[in-house]
Image (cartoon, rainbow, N blue to C red):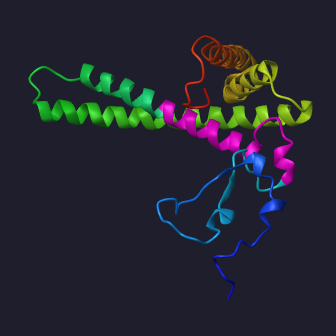
Amino acid sequence: MADSTKPTANVDDLNVTTMKLYNHYHDLDLDTPIKALFYLPTSPEHLYPEQASRRYPPWGNNLINNTGICFLSGGTVGLFHGSVQGLKAAESGESRKLRISRALSSGLEVGGRHSNNMGVVGFYFSVIESGIDSYRGKEGILNTAAAGFGAGAMYKAARGPRAAAIAGVIGAAAAAAAVSGKRAVKLYVGELGIWGF
């Protein structure tokens, strides 16, 4: 069995300038060269070297993030919208329990519908955006606007070309507004550290 007090690699061979020293035994006074064991990199680590050369996230990350965010935001908006509808549909003279039950039932019904619809739109958007990013080799507002147009058009394609074109324009405008808003927040507010801002 190997001696755990001896470093497995020569400390001189390690690139110490890109690593910060980590020693969880700093409170203990040990005479062993334990510091040589705990060098952690400060730069992002990649499992595969080809990931380090990419300028945009992989399509799988894009797919999961966009679909999940759209699903959750659609469900949240639908839950509130349905709850308000349920409260408005309540008749005078109903008990509080019945009103709460009506609001919850309506909120969950509408919330489920909205979350599924927005999840599909997010899926379309992320697949199209990832395809455009890999084809062009870079990401930008044009890719995002084109993906928004494609997602909106695909979502409403069953209702005819006019509805698909209108939904595509709305999707492109919403995607471009989201990218512009994100850039404005970064420029005027700074890095917030939440949801990629």
Q: Could one spot residue 22 in this view of the protein?
A: yes
Q: Is residue 173 above or below residue 50?
A: above
Image coords of residue 4 (percent x, y): 64, 78
Q: Nearer the viewer, residue 197 or 147?
A: 197
Q: Is residue 40 above or below residue 171?
A: below
Vertical position of residue 107 compared to residue 9: above or below? above
Left or right of 103 in this view: 140: right
Tell me the residue at 81%/27% (across/down).
139
Which of the two residues, 73 or 16, is positioned nearer the viewer here? 16
Q: Main secondary structure of the magenta part?
A: helix
- Where, by quadrant of the figure, is residue 112 drawn? top left
Read off the magenta span.
49-74
Q: In the picture, residue 175 is in which quadrant?
A: top right
Q: Residue furthest bottom?
A: 1
Which residue is painted at 86% across and 29% down in the image?
Answer: 138
Residue depicted at 60% across the width and 23% down the height = 191
> Quadrant of the image for the C terminus?
top right
Above/below status of 2 relative to 53: below
- Whether residue 114 is visible to the viewer of this picture, yes or no, is no
Across the whole image, how many numbered discs are drawn on residues? 0
Q: Nearer the viewer, residue 165 or 35?
A: 35
| Image coords of residue 46 (percent x, y) | 76, 51
Residue 57 x, y percent position in the rendering: 75, 39
In the rendered image, residue 41 lying in the magenta stretch gets the answer no
Residue 50: say if magenta. yes
Q: Residue at x 69, y 46 (%)?
A: 42
Residue 128 horizontal/vertical position (percent): 78, 33
**Extreme residue in the right direction:** 136
Examine the image and state in which quarter residue 169 appears: top right
